[in-house]
Amino acid sequence: MKRNKDWHERDTFWKNVEPILFHQQRLNNTADEVEKVLSLVGIKPGGQVLDLCCGVGRHSLELARRGFEVTGIDITERYLKKAKALAKKEKLKIKFITADMKIFLRKNRFDAVFNLFTSFGFFADQKDDYKVASNAYKSLKGGGVLIMDMIGKEALARYFRPRDWIEYGDTILLEERQVCDNWSRVHNKWTIIKDGRRKTEELDLRLYGGSELKTLLTDCGFKHVDVYGNLNGDPYDDTAQRLVVAARK
């Protein structure tokens, strides 16, 4: 019997949420985000970087513009096609690869692995999160660094709202949220209204607190893990906006 695809495996999901994930303001923020990440990881132009779950390539493109050797992987062909077209237009040499982040592995290849914009915790089985982090560890050179950016459990608890609506240009997002399994997961229902049409998508994310994510990464072999409350490198405390970690091999 054929297994039903999970939300993150469906091309229609990524097509429908594209106006939400990659609206113009977010694209405009890319250069600033990359600047902050580079300040945290301390790698220099010429270094080899893996953009893990690169989407339409916004971070990959900016890194390449700054002189890094970039590999971007994603499971969504639609996004990679756009990323490749943008790279070609700017004459940027980036390797874009269609791959599952649970499987992708290049031993001792990269100086840094970027996993940004809540691209972690997709899977029903937490062992799959471990696979992703473990493969990132194995793909790093000695002394290399993994940087992750996501919604932290503590921050979400502080500003949690069961429903919200947000305008992104000509697109309206109605978002409903439900915390599940003793704060280990959050279920989201997104109703997207664009051009008079309404589409609904649902997704589940595993929630990590700062100490939980640090423990997972340490178990994968990382020697030193710093935890921050945003990309500026501020402490992960009661004012944290995001959960950001820099894990050194």
Image (cartoon, rainbow, N blue to C red):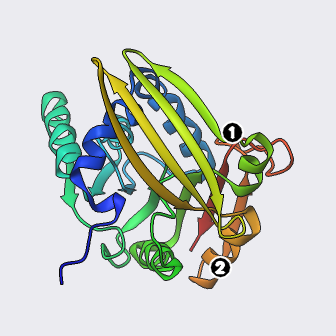
Q: Looking at the picture, which amino acid does disc 1 mark?
A: Asn
Q: Are marks 2 and 1 in contact (CB under 8 Å)?
A: no
Viewer-proximal residue among 32 and 237 = 237
Q: Looking at the picture, which amino acid does disc 2 mark?
A: Thr
Q: What is the number of the mark on residue 218?
A: 2
Residue drawn 85% across and 50% down? 237
Where is residue 70? Give x, y as percent.
31, 51
Q: How many numbered circles are shown?
A: 2
Left or right side of 152 for 124:
left
Question: For mark 1, what is the residue?
Answer: 232
Residue drawn 19% across and 60% down? 98
Left or right side of 234 for 141:
left
Secondary structure beneath disc 2?
helix
Q: Residue furthest right?
A: 238
Residue drawn 60% across and 68% down? 248
Please tell me in which quadrant of the rendered image residue 207 appears.
bottom right
Where is residue 77? Give x, y as percent.
17, 51
Mark 2 crowd level (few <14, some 14–19, many ≥20, 10 Å Cα): some
Q: What is the number of the mark on residue 183?
A: none
Q: The N terminus appears in which quarter of the rendering?
A: bottom left
Left or right side of 9 for 173:
right
Secondary structure beneath disc 1?
loop
Residue 61 shows in the view: no
